[in-house]
Image (cartoon, rainbow, N blue to C red):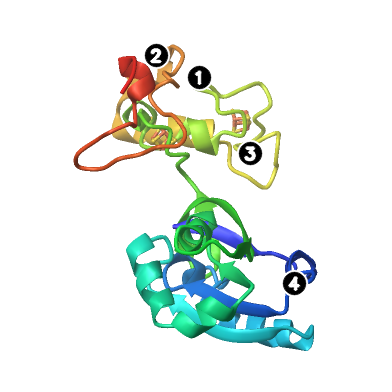
Amino acid sequence: MIISKKKPAEEIIQALEGETKVIVVGCGECATVTQTGGEKEVAEMKAILEEAGKKVLATDVVHTGCAELDVKRVLRQHKEAVKDTEAFVVLSCGAGTQAVRAATDKHVIPGTDPLFLGNIRRSMDFIEKCSHCGACVIDEYGAICPVTRCAKGLLNGPCGGTDHGKCEVDPEMDCAWVLIHEQLKKEGREDKRTRIHGPKEWNVIRRPGELAEAREKVGAAKSGGE
Ligand code: SF4
Ligand code: SF4
């Protein structure tokens, strides 16, 4: 799930300077769970914009904000408003905002700041555990990712700063490397605890990633081209 936080309303209003007519679009998946772009937040944004003197021509929450065909289909249902509007405020991650971008040539404004790919621990409690690095190596680490969960991304650890199981970068945070050693001990995989890991291959991922049935560009750098 993509974890986002709301952008300050003043920032959005400032981005709309000189424009009056607006459509607000939300997302029924991640932005709804993170309470940044569901039905409630879209209604709140409408009220904020109206209070600021804007005319909200339409609002909608796309089931999956990053599904480009879905976004186009929903916007077609607001054909007249889409024709009239000067701008869109999108309450979803940047993928959803750019799905709206793909559906219109008008001014598109992101209404959230996307933060990370997060696991949901409980309601409104998220934690980053994977950086989608393109080649998962966590079997070597007790299925705890050092790339993401160690503040320094160390592939061999812990560093000298670990203190009673906590991280020197943030004493509130568990040291990922203590967790890794404890986990490997539980599994009886002592050999993994003492093994020195070489550098990770970073060239297996590239931006922008693309993956489709007919063509695969992820990993193109590694294989030397498309
Ligand atoms: S190694 Fe870590 S960052 Fe890379 S894919 Fe695996 S869990 Fe994600
Ligand atoms: S204390 Fe642990 S989690 Fe923090 S940087 Fe060092 S090894 Fe990584």
For residue 156, which numbered disc appears in the image?
1
Q: Nearer the viewer, mark 4 or mark 2?
A: 4
Mark positioned earlier in the residue sequence (4 or 2): 4
**Amino acid carrying mark 3 in the image:** Lys
Asked if the residue at tag 1 contacts the one at tag 4, i.e. Cβ–Cβ closer than 8 Å, the answer is no
Mark positioned earlier in the residue sequence (2 or 3): 3
From the image, tell me which residue sits under label 2: 195
Residue 41 appears anywhere in the view: yes
Element assignment for label 4: helix
**Amino acid carrying mark 4 in the image:** Ala
Q: Judge whether 191 appears above or below 130 on screen.
A: above
Residue 108 rendering spot, x and y as whole percentages = 60, 63
State the CA–CA distance, disc 4 to disc 1.
43 Å
**Amino acid carrying mark 1 in the image:** Asn
Mark positioned earlier in the residue sequence (4 or 1): 4
For residue 166, which numbered disc appears in the image?
3
Front-lying residue, 149 or 225:
225
Q: Counting other residues with Cα less than 10 Å from the Cα at mark 4, is it few (<14), some (14-19), or many (20 or more)?
A: some
